[in-house]
Amino acid sequence: MARLEPDATPQTVNNDRIGVATRFARERGLFVVLKGARTVVARPDGAVAICPTGNPGMATAGTGDVLTGMMVGLLAQGLASWEAACTATYLHGMAGDLAAASKGQAGMIASDLVEQIPYALKHVDETGQH
């Protein structure tokens, strides 16, 4: 995100993650998923969501690709953009939490997260969480 925002640095983005994501979405008329400690999802009308799932073990190559694939899959199934972004982000984080619980955060890789997606879906179905 710091590369996309003029005069921004990783530190300035992290100091105002909600503000940066919201402004970027509003100014450009698009949805933003700003990954990080508590992923932020923002839409052009100013609405924002903070994802309660996920952990530092997910800060590894390929996990963003997994999240993108999950979002596109939900869009392809007919979910609206906001619902697809929020749902995919939540399930992505849940899969990461399940992977961390079974394997530990250190050394997690994207495929560990992918293996847990069906269990994240099952957990949400069983508990009614969303």
Image (cartoon, helix red, strand yellow):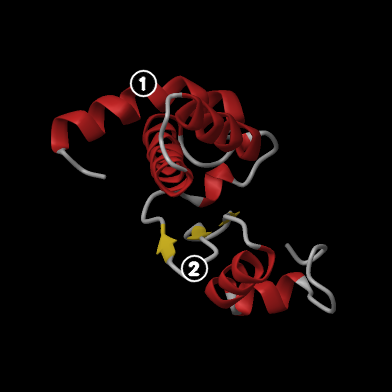
Q: Position of residue 104 (x, y in %)?
A: 46, 37
Q: Secondary structure at mark 2?
A: loop
> Image quadrant of residue 87?
top left
Q: Which quadrant of the figure contains the N terminus? A: bottom right
Q: Look at label 2 and name its amino acid.
A: Asp
Q: Secondary structure at mark 1?
A: helix
83 or 117: which is nearer to us?
83
92 or 82: which is nearer to us?
82
Q: Look at label 1 and name its amino acid.
A: Pro
Disc assigned to residue 65: none
Disc assigned to residue 45: 2
Residue at 84%, 75% in the rendered image: 6
* Label 2 environment density (alpha carbons within 10 Å; few <14, some 14–19, many ≥20): some
Q: Is residue 59 left or right of residue 37?
A: right
Q: Position of residue 36 (x, y in %)?
A: 57, 57
* Labels in figure, total: 2
